[in-house]
Image (cartoon, rainbow, N blue to C red):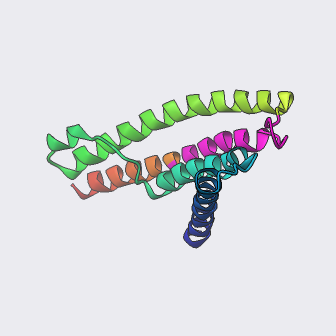
Amino acid sequence: MNRFVSIILTGLICLVALGQFVQVITRYVLEIPVMGLEESLLYPTMWLYILGAVNASRENTHIRANVLEIFLKTPRQFCVLAIIAEVVSLVVGCWLTYWAWRFTKYSWRVWKESPTLYIPTFYVDVALIIGLVLMMVYTAYHLIQHVRQLFVEEEQS
């Protein structure tokens, strides 16, 4: 699984970087802008952002500002703080997932197309709901792990 995710993310990064490189060379060096290149780069860029966030959720490596950890002393306190953080993340994430689902239904119904290439924007919009659902799955998984850890620590005390 790690290898598959790594290959997908690396491929998307390379695709976006190559597209940006071509755009800079053609627009600023050759002074011949490529019509639709920015538009077509929207798709891999959005998927890269969303799948990168899913990967951070999977690895539990999101950027955090845990100021409270300075005042905590015991592993149990750290575990309780992690549980609170995961519960808050899950509540907010489920709320966002609900709105993303409504947006996805709207996007499916309207079926907008990009202005130059006429590519359906649904394929970009659907990344949001897929990404949020996967992030909520990983957040719930980490919450369960922290709760198990808390019970194991209590049994050992």
> How many tags in the picture?
0
- Which corner quadrant of the image does residue 129 belong to? top right
Q: Is residue 77 found inside the magenta-colored segment of the image?
A: no
Does residue 142 lie above or below 12 as drawn? above
Does residue 107 lie above or below 137 as drawn? above
151 or 138: nearer the viewer: 138
Q: Position of residue 139 (x, y in %)?
A: 49, 46
Outermost residue toward the bottom in this view: 3
Q: Is residue 116 found inside the magenta-colored segment of the image?
A: yes
Say which quadrant the N terminus sits in. bottom right
Numbered range of the magenta stretch: 113-138
- Which corner quadrant of the image does residue 112 belong to? top right
Q: Horizontal placement of 114 versus 21: left or right?
A: right
- Residue drawn 55% across the image and 51% down it: 54
Does residue 5 lie above or below 101 as drawn? below
Does residue 131 lie above or below 4 as drawn? above
107 or 112: nearer the viewer: 112
Q: What secondary structure is the stretch in magenta mostly built from?
A: helix
Q: Position of residue 62 (x, y in %)?
A: 41, 49
- Residue drawn 22% across the image and 38% down it: 67
Q: Position of residue 82 (x, y in %)?
A: 34, 44
Q: Horizontal placement of 104 versus 80: left or right?
A: right
- Residue drawn 64% across the image and 56% down it: 30
Q: Position of residue 143 (x, y in %)?
A: 44, 46
